[in-house]
Image (spheres, rainbow, N blue to C red):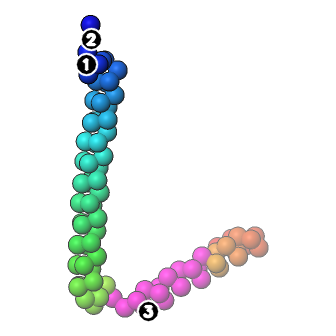
Amino acid sequence: MITPFLDPTLVTATSGLIAIIVIAAALLRGWQGWLDLKRQELGQSAARPAADEGSPIGTARIELADLKERIRKLEAIASGVEL
């Protein structure tokens, strides 16, 4: 006779539960590591001076000029004029 503690269903269920706990712990540890990495990246970018990135005003002007050029091209296409 099989003892109640060695019932195949109980062994399978217990093994599955232990496997889920191990996988969840590994995923949680990986998630915490990823969050620590992102915190380090944010800390380094905040500590680094923005001088090597250039002026944000200059970047905005370039993007604005690019958008204006795209609008001109779309208006030309809409009116049927070839560029």
Residue 49 x/y as whole percent: 25, 89
Residue 25 x/y as whole percent: 26, 48
* The label number, if any, that marks residue 57 in the structure image: 3
**Of all residues shown, which one is farthest toward the top?**
1
- The residue where tag 1 is placed is 6
Q: Is residue 69 left or right of residue 82?
A: left
Q: Amino acid at mark 2?
A: Ile
Rendered residue at 24%/54% (across/down): 29
- The residue where tag 2 is placed is 2
Does 56 appear above or below 18? Answer: below
Real-space CA distance between mark 1 and mark 2, rounded to the nearest whole angstrom = 6 Å
Which quadrant, please, contains the N terminus? top left
Q: Which residues are magenta?
A: 54-70
Q: Earlier in the sequence, mark 3 or mark 2?
A: 2
Q: Is residue 83 left or right of residue 60?
A: right
Real-space CA distance between mark 3 and mark 1, rounded to the nearest whole angstrom = 72 Å
Helix, strand or loop at label 1? It is helix
State whether residue 52 appears in this view. Answer: no
Instruction: Say few, some or many: other residues with alpha carbon within 10 Å of mark 3 (under 14 / 14 to 19 / 20 or more).
Output: few
Does 68 appear above or below 32? Answer: below
Q: Amino acid at mark 1?
A: Leu
Q: Looking at the image, do the residues carrying marks 3 and 1 touch, with CB atoms under 8 Å apart?
A: no
Q: Amino acid at mark 3?
A: Ile
Rendered residue at 32%/35% (across/down): 17
Rendered residue at 28%/68% (across/down): 38
**Of all residues shown, which one is farthest toward the right?**
79
